[in-house]
Amino acid sequence: MTRTLEASKIRFINHHANNHRVEFFGIPVVDIPFHDFLAQLEQHIIRRESTHIVNLNPHHFLIAQKDDEFAEICHSGDIVFSDGIGINFGSILGKKIIQHRFTGLDIMKELTALSADRGYSIYLLGGQDGIGRRCANNLQKEYPSLAIAGVYEPPLANDIGLYDNDEIVRTINAAAPDILFVALGAPKQEKWIERFRTALEVPILMGVGGSFDILGGTFSRAPHWMRKAGLEWLYRLSLEPRRLASRYLLGIPHYLFLVLRLRFRGRKGRGFPQR
């Protein structure tokens, strides 16, 4: 997609003035139907408005309790959505009910389909051992008209400061994508986006966690009935028990205990502004 210099400029707006939001223990979560959610994202592409999409699940909520930088990203993120049944259930316990939920993978898939249909381009940042390229190849097969602006797999590093970030940003901007999917794992991917978003000339920026692994064929996705029932986490646990056992078998009870404690003490999560 060719643009004039003026048309390519990114605008920074106050996203919190838009959307119905439900406060989840200090985090303003966008609570609108999926169709409306996607329609709004397309408007941000058309208007060239920088938009950081953040998914919130119980694991991320627990990370935010001990990571102030990530807590601030969750609190001030342009669009924070409920990713999984755990947040919706927790909202019931907190008596501020979130009605809608959808997964980051579903959003990535729908934005990719939209891009193929409308002529937008996507860029994939992240993955290891060629998974980013395999993800791109599979998406290209599924959507032949899709414009993939580029794929960049940074070396494995726990600290995003060890990446050649200036080069990564230059490469992405030179490719001029409309959507940037970042698969570095949470909270690393959200921190990377937030630290460099003012330098990135991309409207839609989203951390997508393990979506590259699924779309690239490393792992299969849970059956539809499990996803509908909110049991996709259980399917993932069955595929990677060693890596995910502590996250789910220990993390879920910890999360529920924390939510109940915050509810009865009438407090927000640690690291979130008290209002």
Image (cartoon, rainbow, N blue to C red):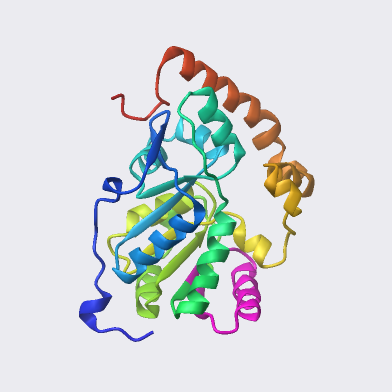
In the depicted view, which residue is nearer to us: 163 or 213?
A: 213
Q: Is residue 79 above or below residue 75?
A: below
- Rendering coords of residue 250 (x, y %): 67, 29
For the C terminus, the image quarter is: top left
In the image, taking residue 140 as reference, residue 79 lies left or right, namely: left
Would you identify the image quadrant in which residue 161 lies?
bottom left
- Rendering coords of residue 78 (x, y %): 35, 50
In the image, taking residue 187 as reference, residue 273 lies left or right, namely: left
Residue beneath the point at 35% across and 47% down: 19
Residue 28 lies in the magenta-colored region: no
Would you identify the image quadrant in which residue 162 lies?
bottom left
Q: Is residue 105 visible from the viewing direction of this image? A: yes
In the image, taking residue 232 as reference, residue 265 lies left or right, namely: left
Boundaries of the magenta span = 123-151
Residue beneath the point at 24% across and 59% down: 12
Q: Is residue 159 visible from the viewing direction of this image? A: no
Residue beneath the point at 47% across and 46% down: 81
For the N terminus, the image quarter is: bottom left
For this orientation, the residue located farthest to the bottom is: 2
For this orientation, the residue located farthest to the left is: 6
- Rendering coords of residue 133 (x, y %): 60, 74
